[in-house]
Image (spheres, coloured by chain):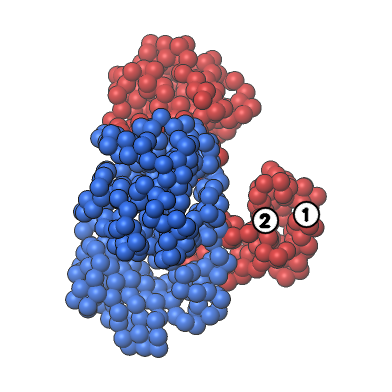
Chain colours: A red, B blue
């Protein structure tokens, strides 16, 4: 397998600097939080100062990662900015504006570390490896390059990025490289059982109740190949749920044997629904969404539809049945 | 980490024999099916004949493993038994009677390969490694010992055993050794995304509907530390579900943040419930179950209770609140 090493000019920049700003993207996910905290800890171990700065707050489920309580959150720069920093290290952002902080960050030399296709190479130093299963796996290799031994807390930060970015080792990016990094990080003290508990066994009660409500609306069509479900304001109210609780619920109808496409209609206001579509393989739901003013990818797309629940659902079913034939 | 090699006497037995019977335990799980099929394929690659014999049928979700359709199922021995076989290789059975076939198997020399504590060393050759994350990971090492290159189908059989035995890399046995074996097997062509689809995205519609019904009965007690739910005959009927669909449903209330103990009451007949208990850490639910004529382990136990749904639930809640104080 291919596996790029951290480039020498990057290692040199880190070795010669004294204090770094580490940042990632808005709406931080596990990879953003874990790789930022992991990198800050790696830098500390080679005697460098560092501040992690994130425009948006850290999701609660990542709150057990060591150092998460010290992340500087918001648009206001941290103390001493920019003079006190040698460079801003930007993680997991194909473009600088993904940080939500580009206005400020421009005042510092930028180090760009990313694994996204189409990264715009906006840094003074750029390390982009589109084959890396998570950004955190690149930070692990960076630590190798810097010859830093990891402590259990750092290993945990980086291990978590593998779990969240590979969907718990269920996505196609669960490569040999992902498993090798996991082996090394668990050897250094990461605890897969604890990380799984944080990520998969810490759901809000309201989200679990909302799942129960949503499943009451489950319907199968097209000889079981199409599943639909609805999330109405009434259901959210009954479950004591907020919009954040709707995340990931579409995975449940999708987990039914034989289902190749799913449509979830979420009420946004009276007579208006956001339709989320998922599909497997060659079934192109983006086409369906685009025709109706929406967009997305082949296997995950969405659009808005107006009308009463029943009529909207009927229209969506007809559109999907047409492409499932 | 410790990692025992396949012993030389075992390798020799396999190299010198011509035809083997491969078997595992009753109610086969992913490790039983995957390691049996994987071993049969490894033997074939070194020119040996083999038959996989299982007393019980292969669960449908493992039906995509190569060779699963050729497993000999039932109590009746396969053709040519016992003369046509040099030995019976028994996988994942701490005692021979776990096969459900001990009467017949005794007619052959036994090779015992297992990873359970307390294995009774009932074989002529015994290889027991209690540190192995799955039996399939031992078969992988056996293939290494025999210097057999794996094909993608064999790698998939063995990779699946890692997924099922580590709970998708979420249990504490997700060791460096487990991840290293996964890395090697994915390198040889196992597909984590496909295996995850078979195991986690092939649920019967009835099981998903039953989850929806069960969640309607969700209650939290003891300041959110105790979750309870009920599965009544009425719910099963409404969901079109059978008892098999109840498996794993207890994991959903358990996934709520802050929940340390769960009780699921499943109606077995009018006025009688099977109570399943789960807990985290030091909370000992076995004590609660034993007091009421049941049993289990500290973190997973069960017992039977008589009475109407409401009264039974009240009694269970009181018993668990007492140990949560």
B72 on left or right of B90: right
Residue placed farthest to the front in the image? B83
x then y, percent, for residue B65:
53, 50
In this orientation, does residue B138 appear? yes
A12 on left or right of A239: left
**Helix, strand or loop at disc 1?**
helix
Q: Residues within 10 Å of mark 2 (few under 14, many from 20)?
A: many
x then y, percent, for residue A234:
58, 70
B153 or A252, nearer to the observer: B153
Q: Quadrant of residue A53?
A: top left
Give whichever of discs 2 and 1 has the lower sequence position. 2
Q: Tell me the residue that label 1 is attached to.
A: A323
Residue sitting at 50 percent across and 20 percent down?
A4
Q: Tell me the residue that label 2 is attached to.
A: A261
Q: Residues within 10 Å of mark 1 (few under 14, many from 20)?
A: few
Labels in figure, total = 2
Q: Return the chain for callout 1.
A: A
**Is B138 rendered above or below residue B51?**
above
**Helix, strand or loop at disc 2?**
strand
Disc marking residue A118: none
Circle 2/circle 1 CB separation < 8 Å: yes
Residue sitting at 39 percent across and 45 percent down?
B136
Residue sitting at 68 percent across and 61 percent down?
A226
B41 or B164, nearer to the observer: B41
x then y, percent, for residue A23:
47, 30
x then y, percent, for residue A25:
52, 35
Q: Return the chain for callout 2.
A: A
In this orientation, does residue B173 appear? no
Residue sitting at 44 percent across and 32 percent down?
B148
């Amino acid at each position: 397998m291919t596996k790029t090493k951290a480039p020498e000019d990057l290692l040199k920049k880190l070795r010669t600097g004294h204090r770094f700003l580490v940042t990632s993207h808005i709406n931080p996910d596990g990879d953003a939080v874990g790789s930022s905290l992991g990198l800050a800890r790696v830098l500390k171990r080679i005697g460098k100062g560092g501040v992690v700065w994130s425009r948006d707050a850290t999701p609660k489920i990542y709150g057990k990662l060591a150092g998460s309580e010290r992340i500087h959150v918001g648009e206001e720069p941290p103390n001493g900015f920019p003079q006190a920093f040698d460079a801003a290290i930007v993680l997991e952002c194909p473009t600088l504006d993904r940080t939500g902080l580009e206005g400020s960050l421009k005042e510092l030399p930028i180090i760009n570390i990313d694994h996204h296709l189409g990264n715009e190479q906006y840094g003074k130093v750029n390390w982009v490896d589109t084959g890396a299963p998570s950004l955190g796996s690149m930070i692990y290799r960076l630590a190798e390059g810097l010859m830093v031994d990891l402590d259990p807390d750092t290993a945990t930060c980086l291990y978590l990025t593998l779990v969240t970015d590979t969907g718990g080792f269920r996505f196609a990016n669960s490569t040999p490289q992902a498993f090798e990094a996991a082996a090394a990080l668990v050897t250094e003290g990461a605890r897969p059982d604890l990380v799984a508990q944080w990520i998969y066994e810490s759901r809000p009660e309201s989200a679990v109740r909302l799942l129960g409500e949503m499943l009451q609306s489950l319907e199968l069509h097209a000889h079981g190949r199409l599943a639909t479900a609805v999330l109405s304001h009434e259901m959210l109210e009954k479950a004591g749920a907020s919009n954040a609780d709707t995340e990931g619920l579409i995975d449940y109808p999708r987990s039914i044997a034989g289902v190749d496409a799913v449509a979830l209609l979420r009420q946004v206001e009276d007579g208006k629904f956001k339709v989320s579509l998922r599909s497997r393989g060659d079934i192109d739901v983006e086409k369906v969404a685009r025709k109706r003013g929406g967009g997305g990818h082949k296997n995950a797309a969405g659009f808005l539809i107006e009308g009463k629940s029943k009529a909207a659902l009927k229209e969506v079913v007809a559109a999907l049945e047409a492409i499932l034939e």
